[in-house]
Amino acid sequence: MAAQPESTTAGNINYGLQKVEKQSNVLNLYSSKETSIRIETFNIEDPLDIDEDEDRTLSELHNEIQDRNKSDLKDKKINSFIWPITGVAGSGKTQYALKYVYKYKREYAHCLLINASTVENAQESFLDTENDLKAKGITEIKKDACVENVYNSTLTNHSLIVFDDIDCGTNFMKTDFGKFFPPTLKTDWKQPVIIVTSKNRDWEEHKNCRSSWKPWRPTLDIVEEVTGYKDPIEYFVGRTDVLNTVQSTFEEAKENTEVSSHLVILIGMPGIGKSETARMYVNKRKADYGNIIWINAKTQELIFKSFSEVSRKLQLPFQNLETLKKDTKGLAREVYKELCQMSLLIVFDGANSWSSEDGIRNFIPMDIKRGWKTPDIIVTSRNRNWGTGKVIEVEELCFEDCHKLLSCLLNRHAHKDTWILSFLVYWRYGGLPIVAQQFVLNYDRSSQSQIAACKEYFNALCNYKNFLNTPVFET
């Protein structure tokens, strides 16, 4: 292709507009008598080198796209042209999309990259592209309609659009992101190719998200054998306010590199559900992180075992491993050198204190190096005195949540009077989740007379309450 003075050479992807001549050796995209405008809204460096496995999957993806577009030329539903690339944070979704663009961009008349990390960023991407259209002399521009203007100027030819890092799932049309996707194609629009990168796993259910991409897609690795991590109990209830507070604390700290702003301490009495709440947060938000490690912080020995297991499971390359075997702080520092390159969540479960002899301060990356990402840290502890971070108390379950938990746990018994049993447990022991679980374990040992007595007592209380609520007798 003979490049115009203001165009880019093959292999470079620049932001803005460029003019190109007819590409007779690739695709006949334009008429031979007109100078066309090629739009490439990329303002980032070329992708990293493509290895053999990636090259194979890129070819498979491209062949699948070509076959799909040829199979039904009359299909106008935008959802049919979306190709999702999913993976956890830092797994290389964007790089994979860019490698596809780098390899096949000359087969498309236009290539657009939309920063879809937020609605505001997506809007800005479309506005930037619209401004370039105006600068190049495109006059058919509607006021306050940048999305429509961009599509009207690009989709009349075969185009590639990448929506990078979109947070919503397959219900995108019902969210604020829906305005960036036309529900159907106009008559004069060509079928586009839309690549969506997202850590939202809902996209894995999309028909175009193929299982053949899984070999390059990293999986979340939470070390289990020594550190004690396990999924939250099946019947986890409540704690919505705690989980929301943890999430909002981390979100507010995104632009802050101070470790203390990324530190959340869940405190509470034994059996209140601190560890289960931390597990539920991990379960809900694991797609936000490139790595997650769970540290058993009950003793110094267990902390060392946890970090040792992390280094072994992730096959971290340490030069002085023998020396580190006697230096837990040094081992932790070496682990962070590797894992803090991507987004990281650390859970210190069962910590005793912050800075005392058995504290965890020495095992937290307090000095964030250049190029590191400040990790989010959750600590669970019975100790109420910390003096740093965001301290959140995990309180007893309310009666409604206690009843819900017992109802779920007693479901296998098909017991119809779970509300009575819930009252018995809640009135006698409070809203401790561990007590509810222990009660169910011992349920079969309870005699029918004990349960009947509880029911009679509860009915008496209800009758007494009804008596107090009756109107005063008037004579």
Image: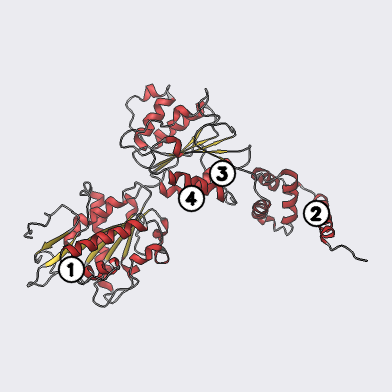
The residue furthest right is 475
Estimate the spatial distance between the alpha carbons at disc 3 and disc 1, rounded to whole Å. Answer: 58 Å
- Return the residue nearer the eye: 66 or 129: 129
Q: Quadrant of the rendered structure where residue 7 is?
A: bottom left
* Residue depth check, mark 2 versus mark 1: number of the one nearer the observer: 1
Which residue shows up at 69% across the image and 55% down it?
413
Identify the residue at horizontal 37%, vertical 48% (top origin): 89
- Out of 257 and 421, give the one closest to the viewer: 257
Q: Are marks 2 and 1 in contact (CB under 8 Å)?
A: no
Amino acid type of disc 1?
Answer: Ile
Instruction: Provide the residue designation for mark 2.
Output: 458
Image height check: is 317 above or below 26?
above
Tell me whether the residue at label 3 lies in contact with that at label 1, contact meaning CB atoms closer than 8 angstroms. no
Q: In this figure, which residue is indicated by the disc labeled 1?
A: 138
Looking at the picture, which amino acid does disc 4 mark? Lys
Q: Is residue 87 above or below residue 19?
A: above
Q: Residue furthest front?
A: 475
Amino acid bearing label 2 = Phe
**In terms of sequence position, does the residue under pointer 4 or pointer 1 come before the other?**
1
Residue 394's disc number? none
Residue tagged by mark 4? 284
Residue under numbered circle 3: 276
Marked residue nearer the N-terminal end (2 or 3): 3
**Residue 303 location in percent, x, y?**
49, 30
Mark 1 lies on a secondary structure that is loop
Measure the C-alpha gap from mark 2 to mark 1.
78 Å
Of the 4 image quadrants, the one containing the C terminus is bottom right
Q: Total of numbered circles in the picture?
A: 4
Identify the element where label 4 is drawn. helix
